[in-house]
Amino acid sequence: MAKQYIEFILKNEQHLKFLMELQEKIENIDDSTQLKKEFVNFIEENYIFDDECDPYGAIEEGYIMAQLHYPDMLIFEMKREQEKRHKRKRQPKSSWDKLKEYGLELEGK
């Protein structure tokens, strides 16, 4: 499978289920270092980040927080960014063009 932009994880039920199961395991284990590595490897193998689609770095910041804490923080940040996109007074044109190219410009509206 070719890598997809990270926001497509929200449409992939199998991957979301995997992340939720991983989240549950991390919450119930004292030393979850190995599980967090598994999360990072999973994201890096399947998804890419795009600076044009995420010009303010909110999704990437969510990814970093997810590495340090819980995988569901990435999903939370993606959904929050989708909501914010249409409320911002200025969204870079290159960002909108790339989102349209991926078919994500209406997400969260």
Image: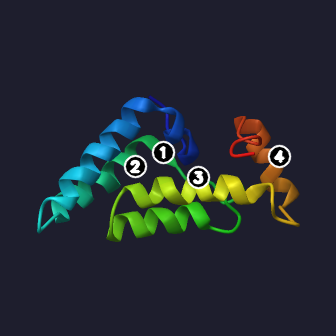
Q: Secondary structure at mark 4?
A: helix
Rendering coords of residue 52 (x, y %): 72, 57
Mark 1 or mark 4: whose residue is earlier in sequence: 1
Residue at mark 3:
79
Rendering coords of residue 80 (x, y %): 61, 58
Q: Secondary structure at mark 3?
A: helix
Q: Secondary structure at mark 1?
A: strand
Residue at mark 4:
97
Q: Secondary structure at mark 2?
A: helix
- The part of the image, by quadrant, that contains residue 95 is bottom right
Q: Answer yes or no: do the residues labelled 3 and 2 have beta carbons within 8 Å?
A: no
**The residue under label 4 is which amino acid type?**
Asp
Q: Answer yes or no: do the residues labelled 3 and 4 have beta carbons within 8 Å?
A: no
Residue at mark 2:
43
Q: Answer yes or no: do the residues labelled 2 and 1 have beta carbons within 8 Å?
A: yes
Q: CA distance from mark 3 to mark 2?
A: 17 Å
Q: Residues within 10 Å of mark 4 (few under 14, many from 20)?
A: some
> What residue is shown at x 62% (from left), y 67% (from top)?
57
> What residue is shown at x 76% (from left), y 40% (from top)?
106
Looking at the image, which is closer to me, 1 or 103? 103
Q: Answer yes or no: do the residues labelled 1 and 4 have beta carbons within 8 Å?
A: no
> What residue is shown at x 72% (from left), y 60% (from top)?
84
Q: CA distance from mark 2 to mark 4?
A: 24 Å
**The residue under label 2 is which amino acid type?**
Ile
Residue at mark 1:
47
Rendering coords of residue 82 (x, y %): 67, 52
